[in-house]
Amino acid sequence: MAENHHIDSKAPARWRQSVAGAVLLLALMAGFYWKIAFTQQYTWFDHPDMAYLEIPRLQFQAAEMHRGRLPLWDPHIWSGQPMIGQTQPGPLFPLNLIFGMVNLKYGYLQFAALNWYWVIIHWLAGWFCFLLARDRGLGFHTALVAGVLFACGGFVGTVAWLDVVNGAIWIPLVMLFVFRGSDTIADAHTGADSRRRRRSAALGGLFLGIAWLSGHHEVPILLSMASAVVWLRKRDLIGYAVLFFVIAGLIASIQALPTLEFGRLSRRWLGLPDSVTWKDKIPYLTHTFYSLPPQGLLASLLPGFGRYADASPYIGLIPFGLAMAGVALRWGEWAVRRMTLLGALAVVYSMGVFAPLNGVLYALVPLVDKARIPMRAIAIADFALIVLAAYGLDALLSNHALAWVRRLKWFFGVTGLLVITSQWFAPRMDDCLLLAAIVALSGAALFAGWQRQAISPRALAWCLLGLFLIDLTQAGPGTYTHRKDKEGDKFLKALTHHRDVADYLRRLPGEPVRVHVDEQLNGANFGDWHGIDMLFGYVAGVSLNVTEHELHTKRTQDLFALTHFIGKQPDKPHQTEVFRGVDGLNVYRNPDAFPRVRTVHEAQLAATAGDLRVAIQDPQTDLRRTAIFAVGQPPSLERCASDDQVRLTRYSTDDITIDATMSCRGLVVLADTMFPGWQATVDGNPARIWEAYGVFRSVVVDAGRHEIRLQFRPWSLVLGGGLTALGLLAVAAFLLL
C-alpha cells in the first residue's frame, strides 16, 4: 500500500497537527532535559573534545559575530588557521549562526544558552521524525512517539559531540523527501508525478546539503549512502536520484570546497603514531578501534552494555518489540521493506571489523575511509528501528491485531522477569537494568489492558510515551554530572578558570601577544576562548607549512613571535615571570621573541624543507636580518644603512593593515601563517605575498612610506558560495515553477 501525497482539503488540518506536534514535542523535550533547561546545576558538554575544542571555537565565532564580522580565518591557534576550512565547528551551519547571535555575558558564551541550544537541537530532531511519520500516513500519537524516541534515545539522544548530532538530526527530514520521491503513487509516470518527484528530490537534496554544513562529515556520508539505497530501488528513479545528489552537492559547496582546500594543505591526527595528509588513505586500523563489538548489539535493547564512540545505541525492549510487529504487520508496504533493509545494513556496517561490509566499502567507495568511526552508522540503524516501531504501534492501534498484542505482552513480560531474575543472582544489582525490566513489565501490563480493551488507543500511546521518557533518561540526562560534584566541570574548568591571565594579556600594549600554554595544566584552546593568539592548539588538523617547522625549539618559537608562556613554571631558562594567576597559572615573558611584524633586507634560498629547518636552527643564520625561502627564487631586496619603521594599524581576523616606512626596498614580514586566499595590496595596488621562512606572509615594499593591507578572501569560498546560491535557486525553481 502506497500513501497518497496529493494536496487535498485536509491540508490545513495537517498543518495544524504539525504545529501542535511541534509545540508538544518542545514541551516534552524541555521536560526530558529539565536538568539543563531549568537549572544552572548541570551541563551536557563537560566532555574533553567539546570543552577543549568545539566550545572555544563557538565562542570565537560568536565573539566575532557580535563585533559585526563573520570570521573566515582564526588567528588564535597555530599562528592562524582557516576557520572556514576546518569544517568541524560548522561555521556556516544555520543553527550555529543563529546561536552565535545569542547575548554574551562579559564577552563569553553563557552555559545556560548552550544548554538550551542542546534542547532546541533535540526538539528539531523529534519534530523532523514526527513529520516523517505523519508523511508516511501514521497517526498523530504514533508520530509523537516516534519523535520522542528519535530525539531522546539511541545515537541522537546520547552522542556527546555537537557537530555530530547536528548532522544526525536531519536524517528524518532527508528521508521524508527521499521516500516521498520514491513512492509509487496513483498517477505514476504522469507530468504531475514527475513534478512531485523533482520537488521531493530537490528538497531532500537541500536538507542533505544542510547536514553536510553541520561540521562533522561521518553522519552525512552515511546518510548519503542510505539515501542511495532508497533511491536505487527502481531504475526509473535514477534521474531523480542524480538531481537529489546534485542539489545536495551544490548546497554543501560553500563549506565543501574550503574543506577540500584545507584538507589538501594540512596534516591530520587520528590517534595513531603517524599523522596523515589528504592524499593518504586513512589506515583501516582506526576503523577497528571504533567498530561496534558483538556485545554492543545488545546495547540497543538493554542498558549497561557500554557506550561506543561517545554514544549509546540504547532504544529499549518495547520499541524493539514494536519494530518486529511493524515488520510483520506492514511488510506489504515497500517503505517498511526498504527501512528494514536500511536498518540491517546499518547494523552490519557499524560492526566494522567484525563484518565484511564496512571493509568492502572502505576499499572501494571514495570518502568512506574518512568516516573512520563505523559505529556511527548506529544513527541510521536507530532511525530505522524507531520508524519501524512507529509502523508497528500504528498497526496495533488501527487494526487491533490481537495475535501480535498477545505476543508483545508475553515478550515484554517474560523478558522483564528474566532480567530481574538475572539481577537477583548478580553480585551487585544494576539499577539501569532493573529500570529497563520494570519498564518492560509495565509495557506488558499496558498491552494486557489493551488486549482486554480496558484502555483506549490514545491512552496506550501516551502511557508508552511516558515509559519511554523514563527509560531513556538514564542513557541521556542521567549521565550529566552536577557542577558541584567532585567530577563535575572536570573539563570545563579549563574555560572558566584563568580569566585573570587572559585579562592581563589583553591589557598589554603594542602588538598582539602570542602564547604557549602548558597543555598538562590547560588542554583547552585558551586562545579561541579568550581571544588571544596561540602558537599551538587542540585541533584535528594543522597547515602543512606550519608542521614543517621544529616548533619546540627556542629559535623557531622566537621566529614565530612567541611572546609568553603560561604555566606553573617557565619552560625555558630565559623566560621571566610577569604575572601570577590566582588559579595556579603564571605568565612568563619571552624577551627574545621577534616582533609580530618586522622588515628584512636579505633573502636566502633553501633547497628543501629539511634545509629550511637546518638554516633556521643554524646559529650562523641571522634570522632578524635574513628571510629564508624554500620554493622558487627569493625576492630581490636592497640593503640600507638606516632602520625601517613598521607597525600594525589594524589587526582583525580577516583584515590586517600595516604602516611601513622603508629606507630602501625590503620585505615586510608578518609572523602569521600563509594560506591560499590571503590577498595583499600596497597603497591600494595588488601585490604578491611571499611565503617567508616557508610559512609567513610577507610583502616586498619599496623605499618610502606605504600602507600594506592583507585580506583573507579565499576563492574556494567565493566559488563554493556561488554554487550554493545556484543550488538554492534551483530548489526555489522546482518549488515555484
Image (spheres, grey):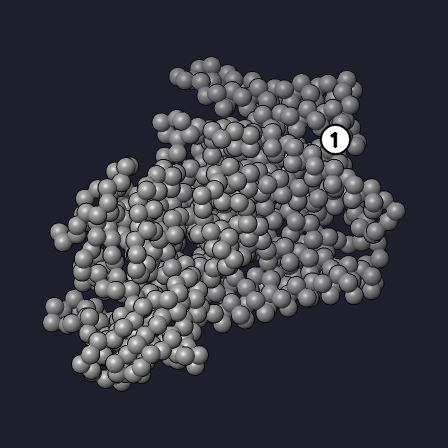
Residue at 20% x, 82% y: name it. Answer: 640
Q: Where is residue 710 in the image (x, y as percent from the top left)?
A: 41, 71
Q: Kindly give the residue lying farthest to the right in the view shown.
A: 9
Q: Which residue is label 1 attached to?
A: 396
The kind of residue on which mark 1 rests is Leu
Q: Nearer the viewer, residue 72 or 198?
A: 72
Is residue 604 visible in this depiction of the protein?
A: no
Q: Nearer the viewer, residue 445 or 658?
A: 658
* Left or right of 630 in this view: 415: right
Residue at 64% x, 47% y: name it. Answer: 172
Instruction: Choose top left, top right, bottom left or bottom right for residue 535.
Output: bottom left
Residue at 17% x, 52% y: name it. Answer: 575
Above or below, 518 relative to 70: above
Residue at 38% x, 48% y: name it. Answer: 530
Q: Where is residue 310 in the image (x, y as percent from the top left)?
A: 44, 40
| Residue neighbourhood size for the residue with mark 1, other residues' Cα within 10 Å, grouped as few (<14), some (14–19), many (≥20) | many
Q: Kindly give the residue lying farthest to the top in the view shown.
A: 424
Mark 1, secondary structure of its residue = helix
Is residue 636 visible in this depiction of the protein?
A: yes
Q: Which of 260 and 243 is in front in this view?
A: 260
Above or below, 195 relative to 493: below
Instruction: Choose top left, top right, bottom left or bottom right for residue 402.
Output: top right
* Left or right of 121 in this view: 704: left
* Left or right of 377 in this view: 456: right
